[in-house]
Image (spheres, coloured by chain):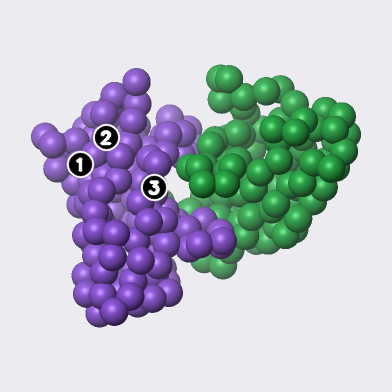
Chain colours: A purple, B green
Amino acid sequence: QVTLKESGPVLVKPTETLTLTCTVSGFSLSNARMGVSWIRQPPGKALEWLAHIFSNDEKSYSTSLKSRLTISKDTSKSQVVLTMTNMDPVDTATYYCARTLWFGPPYFDYWGQGTLVTVSS
Amino acid sequence: QSALTQPASVSGSPGQSITISCTGTSSDVGSYNLVSWYQQHPGKAPKLMIYEGSKRPSGVSNRFSGSKSGNTASLTISGLQAEDEADYYCCSYAGSSTFVFGGGTKLTVL
């Protein structure tokens, strides 16, 4: 059974750095045809793709947020970590991690429940 | 990476069919037959409904279908049911291992 679960702070202050962890089970982060993406959704707004990491540690980032994002993984712990620097109230959102399949055209087949992060002083 | 364009809302009566469009550019939707569609009920995580433009994951009703023409992908739901009422998002591969989502469409079943 594939599951993903996000964890991290529910409240961060402006200018602080956010660190979120996605703990996965039911698949291995070393599987060459699978990766993990982070996706966020501000309250009442649309989904926004943020970053992705492959099994070989190759990474990709949203062009608009690239300077603030870092994605990494610890395969032995089955965890993917996203850091976002210089947080702002506009970054208030539910943050999801999702498994990305690359058997052919990529898509997100399993999602975590999401974690709401509020940015406020 | 500009967001894909979706209508803000669509509606239909039970039993009817509706179509949600998703318009991108030649750099994303037009270049790849790689659009996926996600259903999201309030307070829930998105659920994969269509991948690779027109394929359904196991367990997804065959009332959901996808297609593409040029820079526009479409999701059609036939035989509308009350439980189909949700937000729907398209997502396209945009090259270089990046993705772009649509702005989302709220489906109301009248």
A16 and A27: which is toward the camera = A16
* Marks 1 & 3 on one chain: yes
Asked if B87 appears above or below A27 in the picture, the reply is below
**Pointer 2 residue:** A24
Q: Chain of mark 1?
A: A
Instruction: Name the spot of residue B48 as percent of width and height, x first.
Output: 54, 35
Few, some or many residues within 10 Å of mark 1 (<14, 14–19, 20+): many
Q: Is residue B36 left or right of residue B64?
A: left
Query: Nearer the viewer's eye, disc 3 or disc 2?
Result: 3
Q: Quadrant of residue B7?
A: bottom right
Near mark 3 (Cα within 10 A), the count class, few <14, some 14-19 or many ≥20, is many
Identify the secondary structure beneath mark 3: loop
Tell me if label 3 and label 2 are in contact, CB under 8 Å.
Answer: no
Q: In percent of the image, x 39 and y 70: which residue is there?
A: A91
Q: CA distance from mark 3 to mark 2?
A: 13 Å
Front position among marks 1 and 3: 3
Residue B41's image quarter? Answer: top right
At 33% across and 75% down in the image, what residue appears? A120
Q: Amino acid at mark 2?
A: Val
Q: Is residue A36 above or below residue A64?
A: above
What label does residue A79 carry, if any?
Answer: 1
Are marks 3 and 2 in one subunit? yes
Using the image, name the chain to which the residue with label 3 belongs: A
Query: Which residue corresponds to mark 3?
Result: A114
